[in-house]
Image (cartoon, helix red, strand yellow):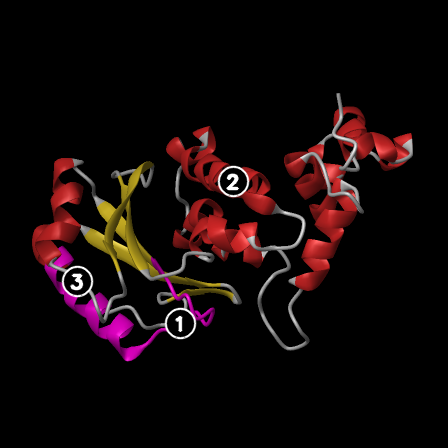
Amino acid sequence: MNNPNHLTMHDLPVDDRPTEKLQQLGASVLSDAELIAVIIRSGSRHETALSLAQRLIRGHSPSQGQTAAPLDFLADATVEELSRLPGIGRVKALQLQAAVELGRRVCRHSRSARNARIRQPLDVLHFLEAEMADLPREELRVVLLDSRNRLIRIGTVSAGGLSAAVIQPRDLFRDAVKANAAALILVHNHPSGDPEPSQDDLTTTAQLCQVGTLMGIRILDHLIIGRSGSVSLRQKGQMP
């Protein structure tokens, strides 16, 4: 039995119900607000789940000149922050955060990613760009490849930033040696949103490439991911 104090999808005309639309046409045709409405299921006393979702997106849309995407607030917000939004509450906040994390895991562990052949370093962005662009702090990840450039696995080496965290070459190459990797690709993010490399990025890359040469493991590229885009140091001519 529906709570009489909450408007639900059934209060909408049939053609405007996101759940029915999802079942009939598939998830790809739903708007951002409709997808959120399906997740949170119910609205409040004064609005449906769909109108609540639309209000949330409008309230967090970036101002002119900003680079953030309309749904960035979902990726960044904690349960406590989401709970304080009008009409959300703790249960809906938990539902939204679970949906965001599930999406990240699907991207990270998809079957295509596990069996992919990397024809060029930028192919790695297909697996990591969406997830890493929204991380609240810098992380350095290493993409391990076999002799035929097939993906072995992706590991996290450090979190906290290349300048703040001490990157020990032994930590970076230990997993590569154990996996019998022939090459690797470095990937890290800039939470500021600007993917342009810093001097620390360039210095660290040069030092790691020297170690890789000595160990017989090639570093093919260093990709930097930001919300406004991604940068390849090799494409910019800044790899040693």
| Residue type at the position of mark 2 | Leu
- Which SS class for mark 1? loop
Q: Which mark is residue 236?
A: 1
Task: Work out which quarter of the rendered image holds the C terminus and state it.
Answer: bottom left
19 above or below 192?
above
Cα gap from disc 1 to disc 2, whole angstroms: 42 Å
152 above or below 169?
above
Q: Which residue is mark 3?
A: 208
- Nearer-N-terminus badge (3/1): 3
- Which SS class for mark 3? helix
Residue 24, percent across and down? Answer: 80, 25
Q: Nearer the viewer, residue 173 or 99?
A: 99
Task: Work out which quarter of the rendered image holds the N terminus and state it.
Answer: top right
Q: Quadrant of residue 233?
A: bottom left
Q: In the rendered view, does 64 fall on the left or right side of 190?
A: right
Q: How many marks?
A: 3
Q: Nearer the viewer, residue 11 or 120?
A: 11
Magenta range is: 188-212
- Nearer-N-terminus badge (3/2): 2
| Residue type at the position of mark 3 | Leu
Q: Which mark is residue 83?
A: none
Magenta span includes 99: no
Q: Which residue is mark 2?
A: 94
Residue 131, percent across and down? Answer: 45, 49
Number of other residues with Cα within 10 Å of mark 3, as a class: few under 14, some 14 to 19, many 20 or more: some
Q: Nearer the viewer, residue 237 or 91?
A: 91
